Amino acid sequence: MSVTLHLPKVRTVFGLLGQPIVAEGLARLLDTCPDLDFVGYSADPKAVADEVLRLRPALLIADQGFGLGVVCEVLAAIKRRGHGLPVVLWSPALSAGEQRMALDAGVSGLLDRALGSQDMLECFRSVLEGSTWTEPLAAGNWQAEQRIADRLTKRELEVMTLVQEGLKNREIGDRLQITPGTVKVHLLHIFEKAGVRDRHELSLKAMRLLSHLPKEEAPRQDPAGEWPLALQGGTAGPV
């Protein structure tokens, strides 16, 4: 007697992403999914069309931090080379005009940075099935993040910002003139307050938490690191 196993079809995902630590976080999330496989990313918009043609991914995730115009140019370059694929734009709130511009350029999903990991996966799968995703920001998520941001101390905000920029503990210590051990203690406190397990998850959540602060209070940040996502966490892991 033979048994046929109906395994989920694996669909590949490529990213136009600004920071390695964010790509690592996305890869970790997709590693938990039997039907999705993260095959790589590029931080150079000019290289994305070539990489898409080489790897033939089923889905492209594009960081709107590069600028909506740049993302639209990337999609146009891919289309000129004859390879169409669904695209999810990772973005903060967009105006109605910007949303229409993105959709007209070929974006299939507008994924709000405040949404959690399960919403992300639902968006990816929905777009891969041919649907359009334009879910609004949930007020409950916004209020919960505001409470987290309010609990973080000034030093914890500084450490979180530098983690989000991709710095290691020793580099953070050098920047803030504190020891790596002190950095680790701050990170453990941040993990507990933010509900994340490690620095990868923190880097994905940091931009949204920082967005709750008045501009004069938010630590200065590398503009290339305006990132998203929310991998929901539990017990803190290695720091």
Image: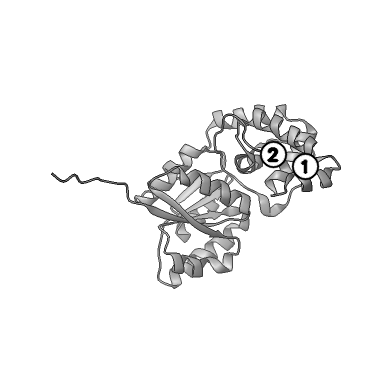
Instruction: Residue under label 2, please give it.
Output: 210
Instruction: Residue under label 1, please give it.
Output: 219
126 with respect to 235 (left or right):
left
Q: Secondary structure at mark 1?
A: loop
Mark 1 crowd level (few <14, some 14–19, many ≥20, 10 Å Cα): some
- Looking at this view, is 228 or 111 the one in front? 228
Using the image, determine if residue 9 lies above or below residue 216: below
Q: Residue furthest left?
A: 1
Q: What mark, if any, has residue 27 been given in the picture?
A: none
Quarter of the image where the N terminus is located: top left
Residue 152 lies in quadrant? top right
Mark 2 crowd level (few <14, some 14–19, many ≥20, 10 Å Cα): many
- Looking at this view, is 121 or 1 the one in front? 1
- How far across and how far down the image is residue 229, in percent? 56, 42
Q: Amino acid at mark 1?
A: Pro
Q: Amino acid at mark 2?
A: Leu
